[in-house]
Amino acid sequence: YDLYAVVGNPVAHSKSPFIHARFAEQMGERIEYRPLLAPVDGFEQTARSFIAVGGRGLNVTVPFKLEAHALAQRLSPRAAAAGAVNTLRFDADGIFGDNTDGVGLVRDIEVNLGVPLQGARILLLGAGGAARGAVLPLLERAPHGLTIVNRTAGKAEALVEQFGAAAREAGCALAGGGPDAVMPQPYDVIVNATAGSLDAALPECDARAFGAATLAYDMMYGAEPTVFMRHASAQGARVADGLGMLVEQAAESFFVWRGVRPDGTPVLAALRERLQ
Ligand code: ATR
């Protein structure tokens, strides 16, 4: 068996061991995947010990994604752009860092939810780590426009600056700022990447951004719809939570490690059932 783990603090409630066990079954891959608790000040030591016992790869969750970025000797372009790493691979070439969160979001929206991003008008709420990780994968789908809006305008403006060249290359109009940068007409897709749902806070957003044809996507998930999803539903929008993104980022990590990409659909259905 090849050994993998998800490292975090806390990590006991991580769904990743369940997801990767299903993927391994599905693909006939002989892997063992465990939860790995690291002390908050002991990420690097924990990762190096894991490598020393033969570990082949790690998923990295809160609060270690920046430290994982620093630990990696090589980075994928999307991990470099995100400034954070959620997937480490250990092999003869050393420590490779990747970030599969953004692609997981894109795949959930396009494949699972059936909403094409090419040519779409996208509103991204938030400018923290979760938002930054989504920008490059979203731009790579060549949307018509991407507006990044954040409570603290300067952080959204910094992302617009950082991704200006990538947006030009994708032919995408990139803009951003504080809540007043939201256009007063329906977007095709609105992604909530703020940490707001954790404490049941709703990010400020013009109600006219939500229309009947809008997909309102919350990166958070739970047994009940999030406050953002309830708000978007009340405006008539279609809503989705981030459980599919969780499964799809895991599928992409599995691909980074094993070279084969599992089907997320049955695993998402099983997870959804367990959440109830
Ligand atoms: P993460 O890694 O989850 O993105 P983060 O980097 O701390 O976490 O970023 C949190 C994001 O949620 C930020 O965009 C933050 O806005 P600020 O930059 O203005 O702090 C946003 N956020 C958190 N609580 C919020 C709230 N109550 N309303 C609106 N935005 C909120």
Image: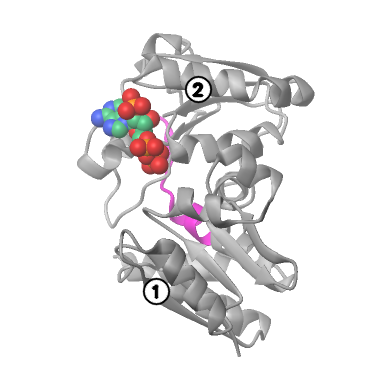
Say whether residue 232 is visible.
no
Q: Which residue is drawn at 41% across and 29% down?
A: 126
Q: Does the magenta stretch include residue 186?
A: no
In percent of width and height, residue 69 lies at 54, 50
Cβ–Cβ under 8 Å for marks 2 and 1: no
Q: Mark 1 points at which residue?
A: 36
Q: Which residue is drawn at 51% across and 80% down?
A: 21
Q: Does the residue labelled 1 lie within 8 Å of ligand 1?
A: no
In percent of width and height, residue 154 lies at 43, 16
- Work out whether 137 lies above or below 273: above
Foreground pick, 113 / 141: 141
Q: Which residue lies furthest to the bottom in this view?
A: 1
In percent of width and height, residue 38 lies at 35, 68
Say whether residue 33 is visible.
yes
Mark 2 falls on what kind of element? Answer: strand
Q: Mark 2 points at which residue?
A: 148
Q: Which residue is drawn at 45% across and 10% down?
A: 181
Measured in 3D between alpha carbons, the distance from the residue under mark 2 to the one under mark 1, in whole angstroms, is 34 Å
Circle nearer the N terminus (2, 1)? 1
Q: Quadrant of residue 173?
A: top right
Over which residues does the magenta segment extend?
237-247
Q: Which residue is drawn at 48% across and 77% down?
A: 49
Determine whether, in the image, residue 34 is placed left or right of residue 172.
Answer: left
The quarter in which the C terminus is drawn is bottom left
- Work out whether 163 lies above or below 217: above
Mark nearest the camera among 2 and 1 is 1
In percent of width and height, residue 37 lies at 34, 71
* Colour setup of the view: one colour
